[in-house]
Amino acid sequence: MSTPDAQATTAAGVVDAVTAVPGVAGLYGGIFGEIATYLPGRRVNGIVLEDDSAEVHILVDATHDLREVASAVRETVHDLTGVPTVVTVEDISVRTEPIDAADGGL
């Protein structure tokens, strides 16, 4: 099992890489912030990292192809983590500024 420091480094890398994918408007942490990776003293919203799998919940810019964005995110996370990754497009966005997962994606 990964150490908390390794998990924190991986989670931070995943967040940075996912939000850099063209078309990703933000991460979606769920209505109550339940979609998250919980680390000592910190919670990373919008991703769930396990030793053998990853889940990423995203908001996609409406001007981008949803499937292409989801596929790019899946490949990006898999390249970083080496584990099977499920990407869920939670919503689309027509906003021009990035959306912060800390507000639950709203």
Image: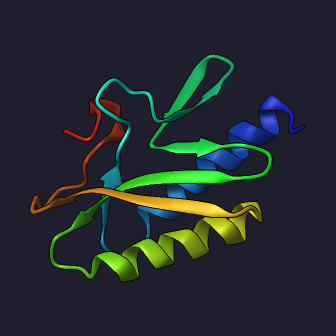
Q: Position of residue 32 (x, y in %)?
A: 33, 23
**Tally of numbered tags:** 0
Quadrant that contains the C terminus: top left
Quadrant that contains the N terminus: top right
Residue extending furthest toward the top? 41
Q: Nearer the viewer, residue 30 or 97?
A: 30
Residue at 29% across, 34% down: 104
Q: 103 left or right of 9?
A: left
Q: Position of residue 42 (x, y in %)?
A: 58, 23
Q: Nearer the viewer, residue 72 or 20?
A: 72
Q: 54 left or right of 87?
A: right
On the image, which quarter does residue 60 sit in? Answer: bottom left
Q: How is the image coloured?
A: rainbow
Residue 45, placed above or below residue 70: above
Residue at 70% across, 64% down: 80
On the image, which quarter does residue 77 sit in? Answer: bottom right
Residue at 10% across, 58% down: 95
Residue at 63% across, 52% down: 54
Residue 62, placed above or below residue 93: below
Residue extending furthest toward the right? 1
On the image, which quarter does residue 46 sit in? Answer: top left
Q: Nearer the viewer, residue 105 or 34?
A: 34
Residue 15, placed above or below residue 50: below
Q: Nearer the viewer, residue 31 or 100?
A: 31
Q: Position of residue 87 (x, y in %)?
A: 48, 61
Q: Position of residue 14 (x, y in %)?
A: 59, 55
